[in-house]
Amino acid sequence: MSTLFISYRRDDSSGYAINLYDRLASRFGHDRVFMDIDQIKPGEDFHDVIHEKLKSVEVAVVLIGKHWLNIPGETGRRLDNPDDWVRLEIATLLERKIPIIPVLVGGAAMPKSTELPECLQPLARRQAHEISDNRFRTDVDRLIQQLETMVSVQSSSQQTVSPTPTDSKKGSNWFAIGLGVVALLFGAVAFYYDFSPLPPITKDKAADRNETATTTPTVEKKTETRLSFEPEMVRIPAGKFMMGSPTSEKDRYSGEGPQREVIIAAFEMGKYEVTFDEYDAFAKATIRKLSDDEGWGRGKRPVINVSWNDAQAYVQWLSGQTGKQYRLPTEAEWEYAARAGEQTRYWWGDNIGNNNAACWNCGSQWDIKQTAPIGSFNANAFELHDTAGNVAEWVQDCWHENYANAPSDGSAWRDANGGDCNRRVVRGGSWVGNPRDLRSANRDRFSTVIAYDIVGFRIARDL
């Protein structure tokens, strides 16, 4: 089947790619848009695999951010490496004379032909389309109109282009999205706002709300000496809950099932996502490069651009400094704590509401601009902040496509039953994600070695 292909650099424009994918998939069909070539297996030829994967492409969109041209590789620019995936993708598309639309994002300029490797120089002669941060939806609508003249739209997939982001999601990816990745997302300039106290949240008591097998939360207070760089913890009571989403839940993904009862032992969890202040103490003590804050500010903002491996190194260091055994929460612990006794789509109800979180169309001042400082939104019944939105959060578990044969005792699910431990689960959605991805049951996965500006983490500890 003919497809639209989105080429992008994960550490340059992943956030734009994710949201553009949603819009294009809504218009042209989920099965006709793709943006991630599957991981090339050992022994396979880069060129052969990419040529095969791009056989069905009808039109390609090449996202170019400010760093696309000069992102460094092991020796010089990554683009100058003949085995660079992005270079191979574009060179293959040009060789096959497939129409290419360069899309400029984040204020990027179109590269000159003299700045490109010889095999990519024809790209500089392609008419570019600009997507501005403050005109994102309008600019994407214009791009879709242009693409409609270049590809056939299946009647079964046709939808009216909406000025609001869609809730489509890529089944073969999300968050490589292996999905995504260190990125320039919607602006490199920091925006600082004075914000007034938030209004109380009105809980949505929908009639179809499922209260089966939940435990009424009771937070136990515990006083303990805490070092200045140590995250604040809250005690999560023992209980049981229905993990995943019922087949009737709006916007659910198949990977959120089968729904099952899980028993959770009492544990502690970070009240907030780990902040730059807290993570920087670790980075400086271990002589590590500080994580990029994308120009939004450090301090009490949740740390971003940290890989799963970075998060593991942090909890090991913190454990050594404090004498307490810190770790990442398991996926089951995370969902139990995020729900805080509720089986609704979000902990506050079934509707996204207004100013309950930072995401795309969440009604906050930070939506699709940048992360919010911790504590900017109300806490759930377990006193946890930002389990929905702001940054997605690493958990301990290896990736499994669904919950078939998953443990029911709250433990981390590792490589048993086909688990992929090169990719770890992320939870909670982010400041640039759709409301669909902020649901308590939503789950995704990323590579353990890549850092993303939409992903951070919070910590946990056994009692």
Image (cartoon, rainbow, N blue to C red):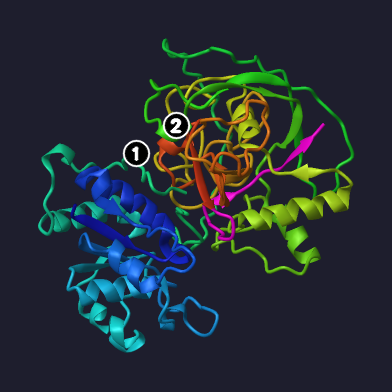
Q: Is residue 73 above or below residue 457?
A: below
Query: Which one is earlier in the sequence, the residue at label 1 or at label 2?
Result: 1
Q: CA distance from mark 1 to mark 2?
A: 18 Å
Q: Give the residue number, with chain letter if any, for mark 1.
A: 167
Report the disc number at residue 354.
2
Report the disc number at residue 115.
none
Q: Nearer the viewer, mark 1 or mark 2?
A: 1
What residue is rendered at 56% in x and 59% in y? 451
User: Start and end of the magenta stretch?
Assistant: 447-463
What residue is rendered at 79% in x and 65% in y? 286
Residue 301 left/right relative to 193: right
Q: Residues within 10 Å of mark 1 (few under 14, many from 20)?
A: some
Give the residue furthest to the front.
Answer: 43
What residue is rendered at 62% in x and 38% in y? 413
Query: Is there any visible trace of residue 369 in the rendered image?
Result: yes
Residue 4 percent location from the top left of the image: 23, 57
User: What kind of residue is marked 1?
Assistant: Asp
Find numbered disc 2 in the image and state the secondary structure of the residue it sits on: loop
Nearer the observer, 351 or 296 = 351
Query: Is there any visible trace of residue 362 in the rendered image?
Result: no
Residue 193 percent location from the top left of the image: 54, 49
User: What kind of residue is marked 2?
Assistant: Asn
Q: Is residue 267 above or below residue 79?
A: above
- Inspect the magenta stretch and tell me whether residue 206 lies in it: no
Residue 232 left/right relative to 360: right
Image quarter where the C terminus lies is: top right
Q: Is residue 225 above or below residue 1?
A: above
- Inspect the magenta stretch and tell me whether residue 450 lies in it: yes
Residue 237 percent location from the top left of the image: 73, 22
